[in-house]
Image: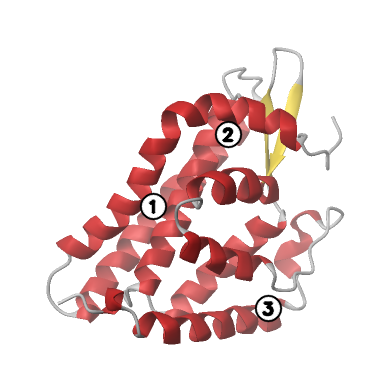
Amino acid sequence: MSGCGFVPIGSWSDAADLVAVISFPAVVAAVIVGAWQIIAQLKGSRREAAFEVFLDFTERFRAVAELRRTLNSRFDAKDKSVNAEAIFNFYSQYWILQINQWEMFRAGLLPLDIYANWLCYTHDNIVGAFALHYFETAAKTKTLSSKEAFEEIAKRRMLRAQPEARSFFEALAQLPHAWSPSCGFAIFEDPDFETRREKIRELLRAQRKQYRRSKVWKLD
């Protein structure tokens, strides 16, 4: 298996569709209901609400990162249950988190600078700096890059009914990025990182102006 080889889109779609038939309605419900339940449950000042949102997302990101490490360890240990369904489940959870974070920023409950820092990592994922390997059969393995997951799982499934969120993440994907398949984890030494983060801040400032004019900011 090539280190940079990606699973063909058609093959991945066939595998993921089997899972999506069952899981997609629940995933969409989790994205929408989860985000707005946080808003409904938060009481008190916007500052207190923002702090609770920050803590919630920090813990959820830790859990998603741990799931990724577990999948990698299980794959390295030749655990054949690390299949297309397991990888689809991971990327679904990752993108539920991303969409929920966007919802909270849109609602004015996530500070711009904090969200910009988090989006630098999201930008890395969208461009394709990361990948997960899985077993197609007992003897054959495949790879799904985070870029392909953005296209096939996030955009085509989870963001299908949320055009505003999809537009936001597509705009993020268009920002310049220095990564290429030969970079590997040298991405974390990106010499243009500060410039890229400022571009993300500019995107957020422009979006925030639009969101402030919308009813979603009127939470009281």
The answer to whether 56 is drawn above or below residue 141 in the figure is: below
Q: Label 2: state its secondary structure.
A: helix
Question: Residue 102's x, y, as percent?
Answer: 43, 66
Question: Residue 32's x, y, as percent?
Answer: 33, 53
- Quick one: 23 or 48, which is closer to the camera? 23
| Rendered residue at 34%/67% (across/down) | 54
Quadrant showing the C terminus: bottom left
Question: Residue 171's x, y, as percent?
Answer: 62, 70
Q: Quadrant of residue 84?
A: top right
The answer to whether 59 is drawn above or below residue 10 in the figure is: below
| Rendered residue at 70%/12% (across/down) | 138
Whether the residues at callouts 1 and 2 have beta carbons within 8 Å, the answer is no
Query: How far apart are the two marked residues, 1 and 2, measured between alpha carbons?
Result: 18 Å
Q: Is residue 166 left or right of residue 38?
A: right
Whether the residues at callouts 3 and 2 have beta carbons within 8 Å, the answer is no
Q: Which mark is residue 196?
A: 3
Q: Is residue 74 visible?
A: no
Q: Quadrant of residue 101?
A: bottom left
